[in-house]
Image (cartoon, helix red, strand yellow):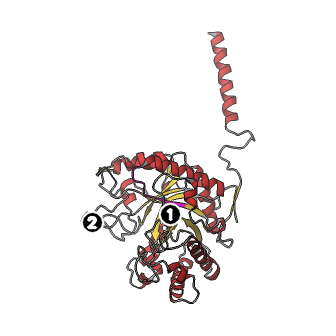
Amino acid sequence: MKSLYAILITMSLLFVGCSSSDDKDAGGNEPDEPTSVTLQLTDPNATAETKALYSNLWRIQEKGTMFGHHDDLLYGRNWMTEVGRSDIKDVCGDYPGVFSVDFAEIMDDRSATSTLNNDRARVIKEARERGEVITACCHLNNPLTGGDSWDNSKNTVAKEILTEGSATNIKFNSWLDKLANFANNLKDNNGKVIPIIFRPFHEHTQTWSWWGSSATTQQEFISLWKYTIDYLKNKKQVHSFIYAISPQLDGQGTIDNFLFRWPGDNYVDFLGWDSYHGTNTAAFSTNLRNLATLSQQKLKPCGVTETGIEGIVKNGAPYDTYWTNEISIPLTGKKVSMVVMWRNKYDPSHEGSHFYAPFEGHSSAANFKQLYASPNMIFSKKLPNMYIMAANTTVK
């Protein structure tokens, strides 16, 4: 007994010694102490809050993935513009960490008649007050033909925009002017301009849009991208945007697929990716790894800026374990800052199935709560302060 007691004491001392040394790395630093990094924004004159957000988009990838939902605060499956409402909150009791919105109706010829623009500004401000992250896409109408985003009937739209003094150039500039006015007057309760992750010309790898691969050459797309960013930050003094590119890639690809028509490292801040891969989980996982690898190579944060399955189905039947099987598990261990589901269309009579996230009463709600409880998924309540500079991080 005496010898056993001595052995136990010795083992306990060894355990204490090991545990105290394990709390630090070889350099004597706490394991949570991040390695110093310097990041570079497209806009060197970005506001302090924009730089702080950028630093946290990089750092949060080490902790997990923020969950987002497009138009989540604006409307849902059964409601429209109700203050404080959210389909996600209805299900799990918390707001998404990322709120995605569309700026097109603020910019183009619909701006004079849109009934939602005041509410768009309102919910962005509400999201910011809770400390959430805001990202914006643009399904812009065609400035040459007057058609919608999907009007790719003319392959001269980009060329006309880039022709100074042309009617299309003047119209497009006026749309950018409206966006700049909106962005520069979009302020929080402290009078600070609210940072936005702005992703113009999304899914440029696809053929559906007037800026896409069927209607523009590589050089035209790159020139259009640069023209838009330069106009906003240099001419209109918009200094609250983090510029995100977001190719669409559904099948299994390579790192090079994310660099399709790449406008250059000095014109991209955030590596977005739109993925409508359905239940091709292997493709999603491979592409996530490639995206995260590219993020580390280029020192630019990354995220899934659109994804989901319309109606949340598999083989025509409700897919009630979708959230753990297809979102939480594939993202575990990946350094990806966000995953954003596409919208839940307002459809109170449930005539259609255009929804990509659960809502109150949906059959996948219980599984979604499991995703919410996952340690790697970050919703509003678990967000760090995204608008104060992250430790050991410099943003130029």
Residue at the (45%, 56%) spot, across then down: 250
Residue 53 figure quarter: bottom right
Q: Nearer the viewer, residue 207 or 6?
A: 207
**Residue 278 is covered by the magenta coloring:** yes
Residue 299 figure quarter: bottom right
Q: Which residues are magenta?
A: 272-279
Q: Residues within 10 Å of mark 1 (few under 14, many from 20)?
A: some
Task: Farthest residue to the right: give it.
Answer: 27
Residue 390 figure quarter: bottom right
Where is the N terminus found, in terms of image quarters? top right
Q: Position of residue 396 (x, y in %)?
A: 70, 66
Give yes or no for contact between labels 2 and 1 (Cβ–Cβ under 8 Å).
no
Residue tagged by mark 2? 348
Q: CA distance from mark 2 to mark 1?
A: 28 Å
Q: Position of residue 357 (x, y in %)?
A: 38, 57
In primary-sequence order, the first of circles 2 and 1 is: 1
Q: How many marks?
A: 2
At mark 1, the secondary structure is loop
Residue 387 in view (yes/no): no
Amino acid at pointer 1: Arg
Residue at the (47%, 68%) spot, across then down: 126
Q: Residues within 10 Å of mark 2 (few under 14, many from 20)?
A: few
Does residue 379 appear to the left or right of 347 in the view shown?
right
**Residue 164 is covered by the magenta coloring:** no
Residue at the (38%, 84%) spot, across then down: 113
Q: Position of residue 255 (x, y in %)?
A: 57, 54
Q: Nearer the viewer, residue 324 or 380?
A: 324
Residue 166 in view (yes/no): yes
